[in-house]
Amino acid sequence: MTATRPPSVGLPRPPVAPEPPSARTVALVRTLASPLLAWQAAQLRRSTPRLAEPGVASHGGAGLGFSRLRLLIVGDSSAAGVGAADPALTLAPLLAEALSRRISETEMGLTRVSWQLVARTGVSSNTALPMMAAQQLDPADVLVTVLGVNDVLEQTPAGRWLANLDAIRSHAKHRAKVRFTVHCAPPRMDLMQFVPQPLRWLMGAQASRLDSALRSHVRHAYRRSRFVLPFDPTTESIDHWLAVDRFHPNEALYARWAEALADHIEYDLTQNPAQGAVLPTGFTPSAWASLQDDDVESGDSRFGALG
């Protein structure tokens, strides 16, 4: 039986994802509106400010005490913190801090959470693996991928998107000994009001197809899940949550992202032992030490139902 994940306290639920249009419909719109789409894309590129990466360190940590949890974060410009002015207020350090705070409040006591960031502006699932292969990867317990936007722009087919994510996960498992994987879902690009129609519809359709494929792909996976950022631009002011380019998160949305993702990961690591969850290799023996080992058969996802 698949566990039900409780929503993050105080955070809005993400908007319900629509059913993706068929590949034939998307191809037809792309063909019929090709000249207009090309013009709109060019106009959008010219009008959107180019924001620099804030220079987030490739390694870091948060908290005091034993290092019990290690994160490997792989992704694009959002993983690299574009949209934030302060490197300390980006996803990787904020996520480590949020997880350290949560674990330190349990019987395990003071806990340090370390992280390694492998991210670059413009990276898609097609280029993330070569980027990882060129880096020295430290041992890690949890892999977080932040990919999808550039796959939408590159029109990556859903099948290749899933194969790429599988390869990234396998690479992380082989080189960093990762045991848990969380894939951040592509954003709802159909809700980006500053993008003109029909370009917005096409980008939204492609994002929806990738997200739908990911949802199905990990539904019954073992120690692998999909995470959806709780942000709805149709009901929340983009001026409060997005950077000046209206595309990347600002520091406030990075903070929300980190808190919600920390809830997601903490829930995965503290499942009832009867459900077969396993703590990362860095955890020391505790009341949770009776959790089962890697020989547990796959079955339903230990990450729960994510919608």
Image: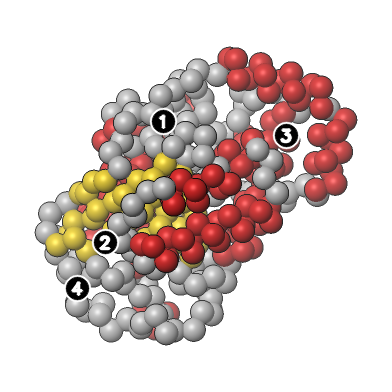
Disc 3 to disc 1, how far (Cα)?
25 Å
Q: Position of residue 74 (x, y in %)?
A: 43, 48
Mark before the other along the chain sequence, 3 or 4: 3
Mark before the other along the chain sequence, 4 or 1: 1
Report the residue at 49% width, 64% height from top: 170
Disc 4 to disc 2, how far (Cα)?
10 Å
Mark 2 nearby-residue class (10 Å; few <14, some 14–19, many ≥20): many
Q: Is residue 237 above or below residue 68?
A: above
Q: Is residue 254 above or below residue 221?
A: above
Report the residue at 38% width, 29% height from top: 53
Report the residue at 66% width, 16% height from top: 43
Q: Residue under label 4, please give it.
A: 284
Q: Are marks 4 and 2 in contact (CB under 8 Å)?
A: no
* Quarter where residue 155 is shown: top right
Q: Residue under label 3, please give it.
A: 201
Disc 1 to disc 2, how far (Cα)?
25 Å
Disc 3 to disc 4, how far (Cα)?
49 Å
Q: Residue under label 1, please give it.
A: 82
Disc 3 to disc 2, how far (Cα)?
40 Å
269 horizontally vs 152: left or right = left
Mark 4 nearby-residue class (10 Å; few <14, some 14–19, many ≥20): some
Q: Position of residue 248 (x, y in %)?
A: 47, 31
Amino acid type shown at disc 2:
Leu
Mark before the other along the chain sequence, 1 or 2: 2
Question: How is colour applied across the structure in the image?
Answer: secondary structure
Numbered label attached to residue 69 = 2
Secondary structure under the numbered disc 2 in the rendered image: strand
Mark 1 nearby-residue class (10 Å; few <14, some 14–19, many ≥20): many
Q: Is residue 215 above or below residue 283?
A: above
